[in-house]
Image: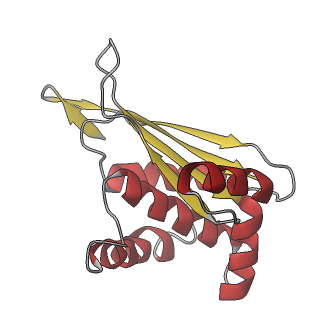
Amino acid sequence: MGRRSGRVIALETTLLNRQRKVAIDRTALERFLGRLTRHVPPGTANAWSVCLVSDRRIRQLNREFRCTDRVTDVLSFSGDGEPDPDGNLYLGDVVISASSAKREAGLHGHSLRKELQTLVLHGYLHLLGYDHETDDGCMMRLQRRLQRELIDAGAEQ
């Protein structure tokens, strides 16, 4: 939950599944999204989205926005930082390739559920302003700690 004008506001999370190749446990992912946003409040933002897409779509997005013509596992797109007329602030979007997540889960020897949760966490931290390419390991240390607290400890939730 975030704070705005001294009152607690709920973080509205939209989960979209825009791919058909990989079966997703939507309920488990939604529970994780709730745990994540309660544990790590987004400040004044009150909405964000997670979108599961195909390899083809994430490659298009990666090419268009990062000038990198290849498939990647996760992309984050920050909101513009400006509140709408009602004072709502959009945090941004996390886009995940479900097929890439499935491949990575197999390579790492863990479940698709854990891989998706890890990618959501990674993308969410980027939306909060962390950048593992420039912060001397701060983001990855935080990600490992949160992974222990929210993913590894919550594996049965």
Residue 133 location, quadrant? bottom left
The reply to whether residue 60 is in sight is yes
Taking 85 as reference, is 105 left or right? right
Q: Residue furthest right?
A: 21
Q: Which residue does the image show at 87% across and 57% down from the upper left? A: 21
**Vertical comparison of 122 with 89: above or below:** below
Its colouring scheme is secondary structure
Write down the quadrant of residue 86 in the picture. top left
Residue at the image position 35 percent from the left and 49 percent from the top: 38
Q: What residue appears at the point 86 percent right and 50 percent down from the top-left corner?
A: 20
- The residue lying furthest to the top in this view is 85
Residue toward you, 67 or 111: 67
Residue nearer the viewer, 115 or 91: 91
Against 1, residue 63 (above or below) is below
* Quadrant that contains the N terminus: top left
**Residue 125 at what x, y percent from top left?**
38, 59
In front here: 94 or 68? 68
Q: Residue at x 65, y 55 (%)?
A: 63
Which image quarter holds the C terminus?
Answer: bottom right
Residue 76, given in percent of the width and then of the height, sits at 49, 52
Name the image quarter holding residue 72: bottom right
Evaluate whether residue 25 shows in this view: no
Nearest the viewer among 126 and 152 is: 126
Q: How many marks on residues?
A: 0
Left or right of 27: which side holds 4?
left
Report x, y in % for residue 16: 67, 40
Q: Where residue 103 sits in the image (x, y, percent)?
A: 75, 76
- Position of 70 with respect to 38 (left or right) is right
Q: Which residue occupies the extreme front position in the image? A: 67
Please say if 94 is above or below 110. Answer: above
